[in-house]
Image (tube, rainbow, N blue to C red):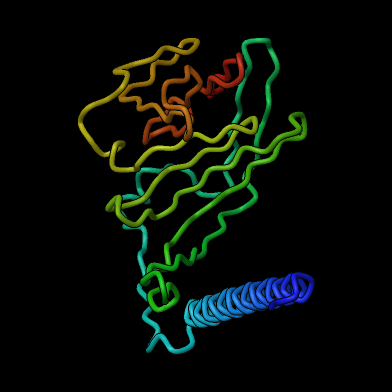
Amino acid sequence: MLNPDSYRDSMTDKIKCLHLSNKYSMMKAKTFFLFFTLTLAGTFLFQSCNKNSSSNGSGCGPQTNTYYYISASDKALIPYKGTDTIKLQCNGGQIATFIGQGKDSGLVKTYAGSYDCPASLIENLQYYKTKYVSANYSLPLIIKQSFLYGAGGSYVIINFDNNEFSRGAFVFAGSHYDLDSLIIGTKTYTKIQFLPLTNNYQSTDKVYFNVQYGIIKIISQGKEWNLVP
């Protein structure tokens, strides 16, 4: 006849063994999951490194450079030479005389290749820029013309009072004008185009511009600046 105490001890030992076996199985599962996670992360990191390496140009084949230059007809739309004097009078009475520091030119590189190899195709976009400084106005006036790929030509960019105004140069060559004429003092200016704020076309801040005189008027941050002939 089976001793009850012996039977109970035997069952207790079996339960302990089963419990230990389950703990061991759970540990094995956790270890496998951790190994799988580390392996997956390592694979992703390796692929990422390979992509970064490709992005820097290695393993992407020959590098192609294309060059885009501002056309002579676009250049002619900007009447400034780089050493000009631009005199503007604020509606508050202040007159600021801006003197050009010379025309700077160069190429801006943009990477236009595939996602994996962006450096495989480099587009070199020409620009011209002149910085105008004034002895009685703390901020410079900057006039820039830059080739914009995809726009089919160049853009005119004017920085004044920490605002950036811009528009495609092709607009100035058209027959439609934002304003037919504008009288400042005793002088009448015609065929005027607006350069709006770059990031806010709906703003009332803008530059009045024509191909003969360049900047005629600037409305910026609640002030109006008019060209002094």
User: Which image quarter is the N terminus in?
Assistant: bottom right
**33 horizontally vs 20: left or right:** left
What is the number of callouts on the image? 0
Where is residue 181 shown, x and y percent of the image?
A: 33, 16
| Viewer-closest of 26 and 204 | 26
Residue 144 position within the rendered picture, expressed as x and y whole percent measured from the top left: 50, 47
Image side of residue 86 versus residue 196, left or right: right
> As rendered, which of 146 and 191 lies closer to the eye?
146
- Left or right of 129 on screen, residue 212: left
Q: Nearer the viewer, residue 26 or 105?
A: 26
Residue shown at the point (42%, 12%) measured from the top left: 183
Q: Position of residue 93 (x, y in %)?
A: 68, 11
Residue at far left of view: 175
In the image, residue 141 sits, relative to residue 26, either above or below, namely above
Is residue 187 placed above or below 211 in the rendered structure?
Answer: above
Please give the name of the residue rendered at 38% of the width and 20% of the height, measured from the top-left corner: 189
